[in-house]
Image (spheres, coloured by chain):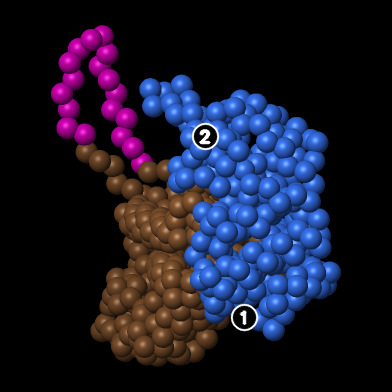
Amino acid sequence: MNPWAPFEWIVALRFLREGRLQTLFIIGGVAIGVAVIVFMSALLTGLQANFIRRVLSAQPHLQLLPPQEVVRPLGVGGGAVESAIVQPPLQRLKSIDQWQKVVAEIRTTPQVAVVSPAATGSALVVRGDASRAISVVGIDPEFYFRIVDVPGKIVRGSARLTASDILIGTDLASDVGASVGDKLRVTAASGASNTLTIAGIFDLGNKGANQRTTYTALHTAQSLLGLAGGVTSIDVTVTDVYAAETVAQRVTAATGVEADSWIKTNAQFFSAVNAQVTANTAIRFFVGLSVAFGIASVLFVSVVQRSREIGILRAMGIRRGQILRLFLLQGGLLGLAGSALGSGVGAGALMMWQRYAIGLDGLPIVPVTLELPLFATALIVATFTGLLAAFAPALRAARLDPMVAIRG
Amino acid sequence: MHKAFNVGTPIETEVLHGIELTLARGEFCAVVGPSGSGKSTLLNIIGLLDRPTSGQLRIGGAETTTLDDVALTRLRGHSIGFVFQYHHLIGAFTARENVMMPMLGDAGFPNAQMAERADALLASVGLAHRRDNLATNLSGGEQQRVAVARALAMQPALLLADEPTGNLDTKSADAVFELLRGVNRDHGTAILFVTHNPALALRCDRTIEVVDGMIVR
């Protein structure tokens, strides 16, 4: 006997050891349940992170735009019935009012990481006989590149943006037959034009974006688009992407400018993510329930099998509380052992997944990370589940009448 | 003392009627009677495994009928040892560990003194050489002797033996009886010995006969 172990531990461990096959089976059952939960949780987390990374890699978490032009027809009043066909107004390129003040205000808002003003408008790029319609995005690289990692997507040249530089996409470069160092004539709808030098060619991973999107310095775009010191949007990233909507509401309240979060503009995607989370939670709950019932049923059988032993223990002076604790311990130990094994199996399955579930690009289909908190949580929850599951059989054991138990 | 089952129901049955019994310290007393006479019920009440419906029970001068379950359990563990017809050893433990069990449950943690006492008790029942064997690996007679040793672990003032030789062959039965006689003689432990064997009953200091829930002799 272990001189350091109290009575309940000694008896609980010995009981589990005696029913070795039964114990191994229930530990195996718990392990399978925990492995499923660990695997699914890590996979879902990786899937979500992958989706969000792809969605947000080329867009800000919040975007502020100037209010849309609206038509306010003059009413005739006096209860007269009005019948009119209202033409929707043309949305002119306009700046956000007092944008510098708005930017400064947003920068003081909690959970805001980066704020980047931009001037965006349509233009035409001409080179020789080739011409293409483009979107000119005038940016402050110091901030914008922290929102969209344009330098990381440069395939030729560099991400330099002086007043006379332009960055274009691979498909646009191909369409106009241009390369790094070549000049492009960019003409805006207002008639203003500028000749810019291609400093770098990028690949955003999207053909449409590579054909249309171009980047210039903010001042260059402002001159070209006739914005005279104005900006058409303010892009914002936040520290917690899931809190983007809350921050957007805070920004709107503080600045008076409508802020749209990525959650709002990607509502369908976010609903899909939420649905996945709900489904995963439901599956984990029912797996956990089946694990709990498994432990409880095994311990109920154990109580019946050992009723005479419980009776004689009570007869020799063992208290009800000690009997209760020794069965609770068995449940907790089964949960702990099963979760330890299951965590190992789950981790192994995840490593196999990372190694063999590969896409055409040679990268994992869904990258997953083995995070310690996931395994620690699985261990704690499964142990606690084992304790809870053991409560009913432990109570039954403690309440056994020793006289009845001994006589059978 | 009276004992009835299903009290307050249409099937209420009184099984012990006005039992008056005094057992002196160190007395070796046989309890005989036909099956169903109430011998086991009497033993259960004396052993604090059951409560009388009315009347009093004193152990060592202390009134027990007003004690709660915790106090009864403690008194039972310290004052009374049990040997049943079936040994009721815990198969997952060795002979030595089974004998240590009452002491371990009382103290909470094992210690060297418990092990020494268990070894001494096993030696006194002639099983020192089998102390490390699992209970399931002992013969029927050996298991019953270990049960006797376990019953003595807490040095009880009273030992209740409910047909301890009922499942044993004549030789083993005799050995167990002599063991109990030796315990009575050497330790001064009072023994209530329920038996169907008149020859064994005659070898006790006194015989109590229970018939139809009453002591007739």
Residue at disc 2, secondary structure: loop
Whole-angstrom CA distance, mark 1 to mark 2, is 42 Å
Name the quadrant containing residue A52: bottom left
Quadrant occupied by the N terminus of chain A: bottom right
In the orientation shown, which residue stands out farthest toward the top?
Answer: A78
State the mark number for residue B133. Answer: 1
Q: Is residue A363 above or below residue A20?
A: below
Extent of the magenta region:
A69-86
Main secondary-structure element of the magenta-colored stretch? loop
- Residue A267 on image: x %, y %: 35, 52
Amino acid type indicated by mark 2: Gly
What residue is rendered at 51% in x and 38% in y?
B211
Residue designated by label 2: B213
Chain that is blue in the image: B
- Residue A283 on image: x %, y %: 36, 59
* Residue count near mark 2 (Cα–Cα under 10 Å), binned few <14, some 14–19, many ≥20: many
- Residue B78 on image: x %, y %: 76, 51
Residue at disc 1, secondary structure: loop
State the mark number for residue A116. Answer: none
